[in-house]
Amino acid sequence: MTAAQMGAALRRGELTPRQLLDDARAQVGRLDGSLHAFLARTDELADAQAERAAGMLREDPDGAGPLCGIPVALKDVLCVEGYPTTAGSRILETFRPPYTATAVQRLLDAGAVPMGKTNCDEFAMGSSTENSAFGPVGNPWDLERVPGGSSGGSAAAVGAGMVPISYGTDTGGSIRQPASLSGVVGFKPTYGRVSRYGLIAFASSLDQIGPFAHTVEDAAAAYGAVGGNDPRDSTSVRDAMDDPLATLHDGVRGMRLGLPREYMGEGLEPGVRDRVTEAVRVLEELGASVTEVSLPSTDLGLSTYYVLAPAECSSNLARYDGVRFGRRVERPSLTETYLRTRGEGFGNEVKRRVMLGTYALSSGYYDAYYRRAQRVRTLIAREFDAVFTQVDALVCPTSPKVAFTTGAIQDPVEMYLNDALTIPVNLAGLPGISLPCGFSERLPVGLQVIAPRLCDARVFQVAAAYEAATEWHRQRAPLVSA
Amino acid sequence: MPLSPDEVAHVARLARLGLDEDEQRRIGADLDNILEHISALQRADISDIPETAQVGSLVNVWREDEPEESLTQAEALANAPDTDGQYFKVGAIQE
Amino acid sequence: MTAQTAASPVHTRYEAVIGLEVHAQLLTRSKMFCSCSAAYMTAPPNSNTCPVCLGLPGALPVMNRVAVEMTVRTALALSCEIPPFTKFDRKNYFYPDLPKGYQISQYDLPLSQNGHLEFLVGGEPTRCGITRVHLEEDTGTMHHAGDVLQEATSSLIDLNRCGVPLMEIVGEPDLRSADAAREYLIRLRQILMYIGVNDGNLEEGSLRCDANVSLRPVGATELGTKVEVKNMNSFRAVHRAITFEIERQAGVLDSSGTLVQETRGWVDARGATVSQRSKEMAHDYRYFPEPDLPPLQLDRELVERIRAAIPELPTARAARFAEQYGLSPYDAAVLTGTRADADAYEELVGSGVSAKIAANWQMGDVAALANQHRVGLADSGLGVAGLAALLGLLETGAINGSTAKELLAELYVGGGDPAELVAERGLGQVGDADELGAIVGEVIEANPKACDDFRAGRHAALQSLVGQVMKATRGRADARLVTALLRERLSA
């Protein structure tokens, strides 16, 4: 059932938030032993919210928003007061934040029912969720395979039908790529649309919170519930939010879409290429004109990202020193305590990136790496600007490949290549969505739609038109139907 | 050019990451591999291109100077590995 | 090296090159990047913090507008340029009093640069360049078990101060003596207090001063090895520490030793600077633009609005006082020492007290009382208006000088209306010639010896007779009139 269907049933009085929560819990109980999508349950909060939602629906069924009474799951990088928030890291195993993230607070105020915190790559660094300190997550379509990452737990929780909506974060593709690999919809908003206050930072200038859902409509509603200016986040966009639901069904007739040549090049699995080509044909049949466009610096995106994101993370993760919170490994001297606390508290990928970022910012290397990467970032953003004078939106693959087997990729650079098609969107701060567009070897393939900054509603409009003309979003993972 | 073991050790110390010898070797090799890959950056034509530290055009984002309530001492200390009841506590600063 | 060279005064052989770095906490109500109160000093440890200043995961900074404006005000008062575009950067280093592992500061594009400060050294007008004034956040405070950091087995951390807005004022190395450094700091502090951005408290550390000191042979242009001196908590300490450091460095150079570029702490009790070298590796702060804060673009209009609100600064005000009120340069400087004093003076004069009387009283008895009671005139029981009323009574002859003095001391603490008190206690000056004439007659009659002495040409005898009249009137008599009456009667 989609969140929209649940909402309708709640308003008709056929279901209660309590029943939806119980069903979701049953599904989690049934599947999560093998899936491991959740790191912690927020049972008391969920119970209280279910009751609160019931009250809201009783008092004002039309005034209650689309998420009222809907069970949701939260990536474990979002602070919820009093509940464990680990970011998938040993170093935060004992941390209970004394405050709640703005996005989560907005969900609570909307009557949503957060049932737990989902598994993720440690500090959101990864493309497979294998970097969680608490163990990997299975892909609902094939438990032997990864769900993508870093928001793998949130993608899998929706993919496995545990919750209709979940939230993740996307720094270089961490929502869109797992959505693609797990056969669900995943949306990364324009940078600054959703407050980052209370989101455990990976790379501040790139991080954005966004939803997973089975349908574009649910994703749009889920985004609408958390978006909008927040005075606690200085990078929060001040322009008024367009209601993504208002233009959802306006279609693509007459719309100019671009297919970036560089996104269909080498490294793409044939099955992915075929599904995306077919999807483009569907959009043309719906009345859109699709032209090939060029974003020549695309291949520099990965390099740029792997300087800027580690540089920011090396600084953002300096606060994990075992003084005010988190795990401490006590040694006779303070410096030794710092070294052991961080050496034992962080996993391999985090250490790798902190090292890389520290190096890129260090004396003598700043100009060659950090400053240079910041300039290439400008170049990449300008190329998007130029292309968007020719087309209204871009369509392309989300991930160059379908879900791979857990443990199959050991080389870091090979792993990083999974995000080659999602990273440029983060560098330019654009909105992007991934939605199911078929299968390759019985594994889901994702179509990515990208629009200019602040044109989040247009992303949903294009995606919804495609979704309405296809049936892929109705397919459920074998795990769910089993 | 690959990083020397001393450079790797220096960066690890700057970042306060306690790495054992094996880790230093492994991560050093990974860094070489990654730096090799991102050397593409050095070939990019970026003359006259300004730097982007953040996207969007926000400037002068500030708040008014109005104090709000703080956390209590108990709340502030609740997550600390070691306190004396009022202060955060750490071991010897000097080695 | 001969014994004579070593014995000749240091300044004849070496020129000291000194630059001061001053950190000033801003007098905002809330912290720099969060809404915790900036009044941290009285709060119990760690009770003045929030997720932002504790550096908790997920917390984000939001700039305090007033802190930015106070920094601009300071920069303008120091004749700095305000560039149209500035930003914040992260300065990365690990220390337990720095929760985020980085300090939000400013690196290559500070809020202001290229200013200067003017002051007097031994009466000579002196100017020191200001490199930059930038804005950052303060750190927490630490208490070490045991007296010496090196021997402490554990340290306690209080994060109440963490995030208080801190302005860094970097001076050019234009100062050439400990005297000059002290005068620079005195003038800088005076200006910061005048424009209301800092409370000037060196002892409690809301104003902090570090000094970079180096020596070079007289006549040389190349700079010598620089030593940074910290932990100077008073003007006296600044002067002593720099004096000590100059002598120490001269000693090393005289004995053909090499100076080490290092940080040294001033230990007041020992009267010496001590090396703070630790095993810690050299710093590499890895500055980069703070991604959590959009940059600042201060347009002309805003800068001019801030400039327009800057009060008249002490040097200009002193010059105007001298000119407008006919005061000596010294008196004008004293009366404009603090903004409160200068305001009080102008209020006194504005309410009709003569410029001379106001100056004499304010610099004399009032200053003594302010010092004695540790409360300025404006905040005293008497207040500026009360003093104006009291001096008005004096000037109209309603009371005499000694009565005014007594009343001032009483009212300064207790407060009250001077005129009412004079009436109530009958303290009005006895200035009536008939009334005084009668008393003068009685005194002449009772002191024949003194009268004879005066007539014999011993003029001192007259003073004793005046004293007798004052005694009889309980000090209220108009002394000039009494003298005149006595002379008249005795020479008749």
Image (spheres, coloured by chain):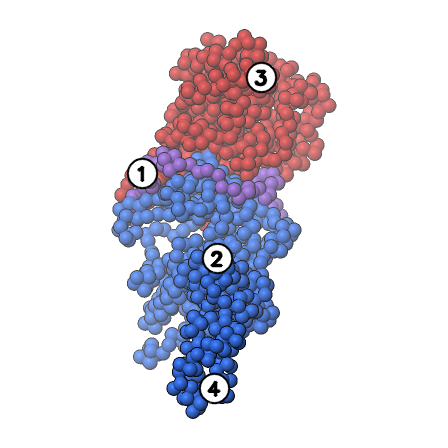
User: Is residue A372 found left or right of C364 in the rendered image?
Assistant: right
Helix, strand or loop at mark 3: loop
Q: Colour of chain C?
A: blue
| Quadrant in the picture for residue C312 | bottom right
Q: Which chain wears purple?
A: B
Residue A475 visible in rendering: no
Residue bearing the label numbered 2:
C416
CA distance for labels 4 and 2? 42 Å
Place of residue C214 in the rendered image (x, y in percent of width and height, measured from the top left): 41, 66
CA distance for labels 3 and 2? 65 Å
Place of residue C24 in the rendered image (x, y in percent of width and height, measured from the top left): 47, 54
Same chain letter for marks 1 and 4: no
Q: Residue drawn at (50%, 74%), measured in percent from left and top? A: C435
Q: Chain of mark 1?
A: B
Residue bearing the label numbered 3:
A60
Marks 1, 4: nearer the viewer: 4
CA distance for labels 1 and 4? 85 Å
CA distance for labels 3 and 1? 47 Å
Q: Which mark is residue C490?
A: 4
